[in-house]
Image (spheres, rainbow, N blue to C red):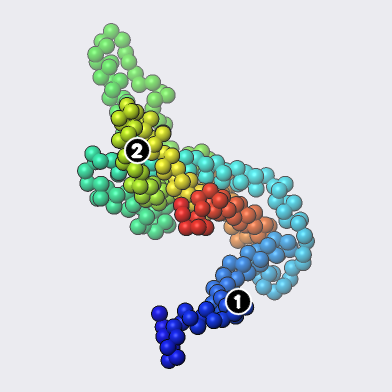
Amino acid sequence: MGVFPSGRSTTELVDDLNLETRDLIGWLLVLPGLLLFSMFMIYPIAMLIYISLTDATTAGSVVSGETSVVGFDNYVELLTDWQFWNSMSITWLYLALSLVLKVILAIGLAMVLTHERVKGKRYMRAIVIIPMGFPPIFTISIWRAMFSGARFGPMNEFLSMYNGAVTSVTGLVDTIVFFTTVNAPQFLLADVPIGFLSSRWTAFAAYVTTEVWLAYPFMVIIIVSALQDVPGELQDAAKVDGAGFFHRFVNVTFPSIKGPVIFASILTAATSFQNFLIPWVLNQGGPARQNELILVYGYREAIIENQFALASSIMTIAIIIIGMFMLLAVRKTNIAEGAA
């Protein structure tokens, strides 16, 4: 605490200021932050909304001012466009499926990493979060190679090994059952090679797999921290009452970690909604634009189709939905008060 030549402390001098002067000092202190926030957040969003209300086609038309206001025409066109609803539905399906898989995988791994009988948990935790150490573009490129449609691509090789195992088992059965011929049922065999990224739903499965791989470490970290705060006395009391593992998890463990799980789920869901790199790097939202997530759809309309105004309306809707995610996070997890 500073002391001035008069012998009075900084706190005492501040206490002598009237309320209006204190408010003015407070505003002066936060003004730089407000200016930066306005420059990098509020202004771009306001500009985006303005462009969505014009007939802008390219960035040049926006800069030169060669645009005119058309009101909500872009939104009307957007809401009557089949491609918009296809992108919106595939985005929500991608979000929901990947979120369920991430929660299940993260809770399972977190339970293992905090179990008292598991040895080397510290090293296992370090291994689990390794995907967070790589740039997303690098990881996505690796997964694109994994899902290559080439005959000797990694996934096709795995399926070939699976086919070989099924054939070997049926061959062994055929040897034992000598009075008849036993062949591997065709429905158990994979038809390789498979063009994973050239078919809609196999490409979608590749999207979800890549998203789960990228996002699960974050959820594991959150859930592991939450599990470490579960009172051991509650677990011991449940064991004394004869509760099994499943009943202890449902009635003791999960209620104790529900808040952090919801917090992590909302954040990772918002991230999944605004995912661009995964579909674009894997196959640019294909085949035939069937798997275009909402941001890929907006990017294509702006950069490839030269429809800046329409793309701006797409992004405006996306921002509104992401804002709803953040509002939900604040209300459900008390994040504004600093508690998850």
Of residues 56 and 187, which is closer to you in this image? 56
The residue sitting at 54% across, 81% down in the picture is: 16
Quick one: SS at disc 2? helix
Disc 1 residue type (three-letter): Leu
Residue 295 quadrant:
bottom right
Disc 2 residue type (three-letter): Leu
Residue 340 seen in render: yes
The residue sitting at 36% across, 44% down in the picture is: 230
Of residues 251 and 163, which is closer to you in this image? 251
Mark drawn on residue 19: 1
- Return the x and y of residue 96 as percentages of the image width and height: 52, 41
Of residues 23 and 102, which is closer to you in this image? 23
Q: Is residue 200 left or right of residue 308?
A: left
Q: Is residue 55 above or below residue 86?
A: below
- Return the x and y of residue 108 as percentages of the image width and height: 36, 39
- Return the x and y of residue 48 as percentages of the image width and height: 65, 64
Of residues 312 and 1, which is closer to you in this image? 1
The residue tagged 2 is: 234
Residue 195 seen in render: no
